[in-house]
Image (cartoon, rainbow, N blue to C red):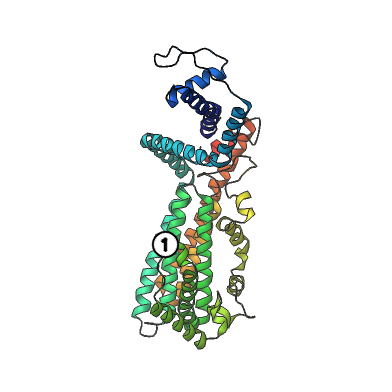
Amino acid sequence: MNSLQKALEKGLAKLPVIGISNLIKRKLSEQGAKISSRKAEAVARQLLAGKTNFALPGNRTEPLKIAFTKEDSEEVVKRVEGFLENDLQDLILKTQEDIALRTFKTLKRRWSAESRRQKQEISEFRSRLYDRWRTGISKLHMLVTMSRELGDNINQDARQDTETSGSAIVDVLTRLHARSCQVAEEVIVLLETGFANGAMDRWRTMHEIAVTAAFISNHGNECAQRYADHQIVESYRGAQEYDAVHARLGYEPIPPEKMDEIRKEYERVIQKYCKVFGGQYGWAANYLPGVNATFKEIEKATKIDYLRGHYRMASHGVHANPKGIFFSMTSMFPTEVLLAGPSNSGLADAGEGTALSLLMISATLLSLSPNFDHQVAIRMMGLLKDEIGTAFQKAHDRLYRDEEQLLASVSSPTSSTTSDALDSGK
């Protein structure tokens, strides 16, 4: 029985006592005897228990009689019904508040010890996880370092070149590359902590960056300028959405002069390019068939659409669609256990995918400064990417074999023992 139910039952059990005690006080008062509410409730309990003789406070010698009529019974019933109809909800809310406050105080007192215990468990889990996946993760760290250093060198060379300095394509591609390095680091953090679905979600972003960079590189500086100008469209959309809900959020509205400035900038770029420029991928619309450009079309144009299946799989974890709650990267074998934390399985796709996408955008960046040293660096990164894929696959295969052996040793393949072994990094 939960705390709220116990408290309510205790409170409701007192209703007949309270109703009768009020009658007792009134009837005794009519006979010149006054008692406290607490004493009246005690008398009411004795009456309800069948006791008819009991002592009352004071030195009265004359007998007192308490007789209940049919009207008295109806009054008690009416009082109880009135309470249930009008006051019960208040009782429930007050009971909830009291229980929540007491329980919250208890949890805060105990949290320090519980936090230390959880941190110890997490530390041990991550140590076991890293032991299993260390080769792939370490090499992925190395690839990110190489890509970052290459990006820094190309950025300096391209911005110092008189032919490319100040061009939109240099600014856009170097920014996209820098962001991909940052996202790759996020993937590594998620891999090291056992969040395969989250790592795959972040790879999805890396894939979008790699495809976008390739498309812009293929279409040159004008396309890069369109891409840069499209942030004005995004700002206008964001301002409109904010303006529609700021009052409900309790936020201040955008100042009229600022909103007018945003609107004028939006109208300027729409006039500069065309109406379809206001679409989500309007910056790419001029280079694609049809009116409304989509990311799928951009993928196809760059010939990186062979990763569409992986992209869709990663999208399940980003959106609240049903596949996202029934499918998990960590599900090596059927199980009824719902994973609500980290796991040491399912890391291979995100690790290998991140290496591939980082190599792609690094190779795209090479177009800004394709000198001999930079080409050698890309070749080295390609070799390392292959080693990363092999390392992650080997770790996955070993984990699969270990899990098969564990399944063979237990009676049920869906038992909690199986999931405990997976989720604890054993």
In the rendered image, residue 250, in percent from the top left (x then y), is placed at 42, 63
Can residue 425 be seen in this snapshot? no
Disc 1 element: helix
Q: Is residue 359 left or right of residue 309?
A: left
Seen from the viewer's position, the closer of residues 394 and 8 is 8
Point 42% across, 71% down: residue:
253
Q: Which residue is mark 1?
A: 182
Is 71 drawn above or below residue 386 in the view shown?
above
Seen from the viewer's position, the closer of residues 60 and 168 is 60
Quarter the N terminus occupies: top right
Seen from the viewer's position, the closer of residues 155 and 209 is 209
Can residue 64 be seen in this snapshot? yes
Point 56% across, 77% down: residue:
279
Q: How many marks?
A: 1
Is 169 drawn above or below residue 339 in the view shown?
below
Is 359 drawn above or below residue 90 in the view shown?
below
Is 367 drawn above or below residue 61 in the view shown?
below
Amino acid on which disc 1 is placed: Gln
